Image (cartoon, rainbow, N blue to C red):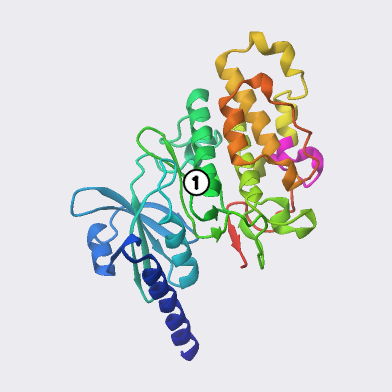
Amino acid sequence: MVVMKNKNMKDDQYVKAFIMNHGSFAPKRYTYSEIKKMTNSFKEKLGQGGYGSVYKGKLLDGRLVAVKVINELKGSGEEFINEVASISRTSHVNIVTLLGYSYETTKRALVYEFMPNGSLDKFIYNHEPSSTNCQLEREKLFQIVVGIARGLEYLHRGCSTRILHFDIKPQNILLDEDFCPKISDFGLARLCQKKESIVSMLGTRGTIGYIAPEVFSRNFGGVSYKADVYSYGMLVLEMVGRRKNSNVVMSHSSENYFPHWIYQELNLNVNVGNHMDMMEEGEEMERKMILVSLWCIQTVPPDRPSMTKVVEMLEGGLQSIEIPPKPFLSSPKRSIQNSSTTSLS
């Protein structure tokens, strides 16, 4: 009991420090009773994850919101405020807007703008039959890919403090009524100065299947914003392949590594230039997404482009993008489920 009391006191210190540092710029703080009222006693659940549950709610002015209620036994006050502090520094069309939060000892909640189309994952996997699962056309997929890239570029370069997300995956990309993508869930994010190229980490953070090699093994180099670039590349490959990268990997051999499957399935080794004139616009978009994503998942971090370069490649001509080397890293052994999120720091 003494340990729990000390932990709660420590968590409260994070909250107080955050409010003092952000002052009037801090998101609105709600009481838990207000959270309960805006969700009509948590009547309509939108989703469930390891962090807790998301409910549909409505503010007094009539605006719809999504309320993420954090599990009482999971996550520290530091991690909770980390998400609030990270996202409150942002203002971008491709970053979800945090409208408020509630923090009362073990009862924590985050209030976000409501995204009518939910998360990206339900629109890109063709093996999950569902009444809400519809296949997005290539042009719309391409627009989403570009939007996510712009959001990440903003986090890396557009903020006064660089934000490294560390958990880019389909479940953390939300879609508004026009299918405009918005990056969400900053619970594992790290803030760092722009001049810092390498960040110190005590453990692995991210989701299996999207974690950059240097994050789970420092033998591949230091951890930097290039870790987000890798996760983005894996996300885009899934969007193009219409399947989870873990489902392609039936064993841990390099031949079954998801990017290798993309190479084989989509004939990336064919000289793109010989077919440039005959390509339809949709085919050109798809080939561009493949080339860019394979550059993003290069094993050595310096070989990956910045998100600024990614946006340039996506918005430029296909002929200006070189064919990247075939990925040589095999998929890490999956001792835990692909959908689980690991945070040891």
What count of labels does the image hold?
1
Q: Does residue 139 lie above or below 40 as drawn? A: above
Left/right of residue 59 with respect to residue 340 in the rendered view? left
Q: Is residue 298 visible?
A: no
The structure residue drawn at horizontal position 81% and vertical position 41%, both measured from the top left corner, is 328
Residue 72, given in percent of the width and then of the height, sits at: 43, 71
Dot 1 corresponds to which residue?
A: 158
The structure residue drawn at horizontal position 49% and vertical position 53%, both measured from the top left corner, is 160
Region of the chain picked out in magenta, as a range = 248-259
The structure residue drawn at horizontal position 74% and vertical position 51%, both measured from the top left corner, is 332
The structure residue drawn at horizontal position 69% and vertical position 35%, both measured from the top left corner, is 294
Residue 67, given in percent of the width and then of the height, sits at: 34, 56
Q: Which residue is at the front of the view, 56 or 96?
A: 96
Q: Does residue 328 lie above or below 85 as drawn? A: above
State which quadrant residue 278 falls in.
top right
Q: Does residue 24 lie above or below 47 as drawn? A: below
Q: Amino acid at mark 1?
A: Gly
Residue 229, given in percent of the width and then of the height, sits at: 63, 44
Q: Secondary structure at mark 1?
A: helix
Q: Inspect the magenta stretch and tell me whether residue 256 lies in it.
A: yes
Report the residue that reaches farthest toward the top: 278
Report the residue that reaches farthest toward the bottom: 2
**Crowding at label 1, few (<14), some or many (≥20) Cα neighbours within 10 Å?**
some
